Image: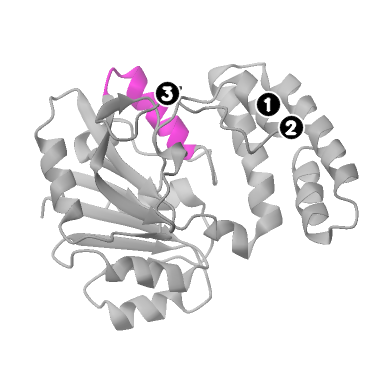
Amino acid sequence: MQLSIVIVTYRCKDDVLKCLATLPSAEQIIVVDNASGDGTVEAIREQFPAIRVLALDENIGFARANNLAAKHATGEFLLLLNPDTMIPEPGTLARCVDYLTAQDSYTCGMTCRVESEDGSLQWECARHFPTVESECAKAFFPYKRWDAIKNFDATKEQAVPCVLGAFVLLRRANWEALAGFDEHFFLMYEDVDLCRRLYERGWKLMYWPEARIIHTGGQSWKSERPRTYANTHISSLQYIAKYWPGSERNVKFIFRVALALKKLATRGDASKQAMIVAAQEALR
């Protein structure tokens, strides 16, 4: 098999079943279930008996679970795929593998056009690396595209610094050269960190608009919104500490200020208050 597909799932049974139904059965598919406890494992084994399912007894995090699955991969190429994605057109993955195969040895991987269900492009699929400044800005204005590539033309094939972890096709040799994801990241920013380490090795990631997937997104938020929101802050600080040692103290203070203001602004909204409190407690 040329391609090994790795999917890590946590409490999104319906989404992962939809995803698996769109994948080519001839490829090696490895699913890690992070102790969902929602019947995901049983449903996959019943509906897709050929797929290898690693059922964990505890949630070990997204990065670590992907690394675990990748150890069982045998393909020359490794596709990191989110469970809340769908491949709408047959042959898409084969075309992506052919595309990457045809690139020079410095091109370690690629992504495609990642769309929302309405067909709009998810800009995060091709972006710049976050900076200390952009992470601080996000704390106050999270919906602005701080890391967007200026004047990005989504219709053109091009090298990009950072891609979205929902769909990353890599040469397995490059993945193994980095030992996969940094397991210090439990959830969030592991994809950004991986892209940065690939970039620092002198390798390229390509955006190829001739293929597309659908990414519903936000499924981890649905099951545990406070915990996931807290993780975005913790992982951001871990990323900053890794690449700008010492800066995380000031950023942590800025995060606390932003959260305090948000708490005041969302009084009366129990759901948002719970998320903010979770993040505040994580940053103590």
Residue 38: x and y, percent? 52, 76
The residue that disc 3 covers is 151
Q: Quadrant of residue 158?
A: top left
The residue that disc 1 covers is 137
Q: How is the image coloured?
A: one colour
Which quarter shows the C terminus? top right
Residue type marked 3: Asn
Residue type marked 2: Phe
Instruction: Say what secondary structure mark 3 lies in.
Output: loop
Answer left or right for 284 relative to 51: right
Answer left or right for 89 relative to 139: left
Residue 140: image tag: 2
Question: Which residue appears at 21% of the width and 73% of the height?
Answer: 50
Number of numbered discs on residues:
3
Instruction: Say what secondary structure mark 1 lies in.
Output: helix
Residue 116: x and y, percent? 44, 53
Indicate whether residue 202 is drawn in magenta. yes
Residue type marked 1: Ala
Indicate whether residue 165 is drawn in magenta. no
Answer left or right for 258 relative to 202: right
Q: Is 36 located above or below residue 138 in the figure?
A: below
**Which region of the structure is painted magenta?**
190-203
Q: Visible in this render: residue 176?
A: no
